[in-house]
Amino acid sequence: MEMRFRIFRYDPKVDREPVYRNYLVSAEPEERILDCLNRIRWEQDGTLSYRMSCGHGVCGSDGMRINGRCALACQKLVKDYLGSEVVVEPLPFFKVLKDLVVDVDGFLSGVMYFRPYLISSAAPPPRERSQSPEERKKVEEVIRCILCACCTGSCPVMAENEQYVGPAALVWAYRTIFDSRDDLKLERLEAVNSQKGVWACVNHLECTRACPKEIPVTKCINTLKREIEKHRSGKP
């Protein structure tokens, strides 16, 4: 079958403004949108730029907006778009470097702001730092995050609050705050306790809908809010 694609094209080094270009691609229902993009670049237009790596929803490289929804091109199938034109655009709220490639430096800086690694004052044990199954369960959902930025690109607050670090950064803060092996819980809670952090979230739920790993992002942010309130009140 043939699929019609309308793809955002823009090279800020040479173009005054973005344009959309149309492509016709032969594809099977079980093929991925990424397969179609590869076919366009390999067979029709070698200048088309986008990111990809593993092609299996693990690396998070190919986050983009497909028919108005942020997603991984390697996870979306042709059969999901039968009967419609497929419009492919870069992730919203990110500076476009070229076509579907966006600048993620600011996004990653937001994640790094909360020091997304374990910090312990205890001497390193002979082996790994142990966790009980119950302790592990507290973070087992958020550790699935692959930093694809689909949640951040989907969040309406990003258009309203340029200081907001975004949902992905808060997911990574969550995983250290509730990790039993980390010693800086209170300090980390204070770091997310701002209009740059958890209080910017107003529960649009778009981040949760967009997450390709089905992380309950909004729920995690609200859990952080409740944890802040609990410590403010002095509750154990």
Image (cartoon, rainbow, N blue to C red):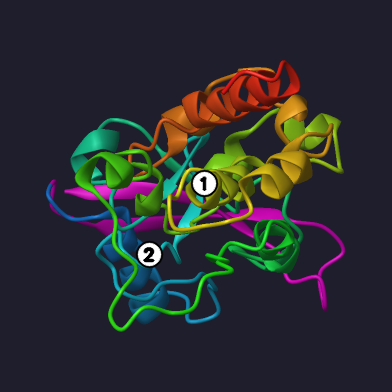
CB of mark 2 within 8 Å of CB of mark 1? Answer: no
Question: Is 211 or 199 nearer to us in this picture?
Answer: 199
Question: Is 209 or 96 nearer to us in this picture?
Answer: 209
Which amino acid type is marked by label 2?
Answer: Leu
Distance in Å between CA atoms under marks 2 and 1:
18 Å
Q: Residue 37 got which mark?
A: 2
Q: How many marks?
A: 2
Secondary-structure class at tag 2: helix
Query: Which of the 4 image quadrants contains residue 193?
Result: top right
5 falls in the magenta region: yes
> Which stretch is magenta?
1-29
Decide if residue 30 is on the left or right side of residue 85: left
Residue at the spot 75% in from the left edge and 56% down from the top edge? 18
Which amino acid type is marked by label 1?
Answer: Cys
Against 194, is 93 above or below? below
Residue at the spot 48% in from the left edge and 55% down from the top edge? 63
**Foreground label between 2 and 1:** 1
Residue 21 visible here = yes
189 falls in the magenta region: no
Residue at the spot 46% in from the left edge and 30% down from the top edge? 208
Decide if residue 36 is on the left or right side of residue 171: left
Residue 165 visible here = no
Give the x, y percent position of residue 173.
59, 49
Secondary-structure class at tag 1: helix
Mark 1 surroundings within 10 Å by alpha-carbon count, few (fewer than 14), some (14 through 19), many (20 or more): many
Question: Is 103 or 108 nearer to us in this picture?
Answer: 108
Decide if residue 19 is on the left or right side of residue 154: right
Give the x, y percent position of residue 64.
51, 52
* Residue to which mark 1 is pinned: 150
Give the x, y percent position of residue 197.
75, 38
Residue at the spot 38% in from the left edge and 52% down from the top edge? 143
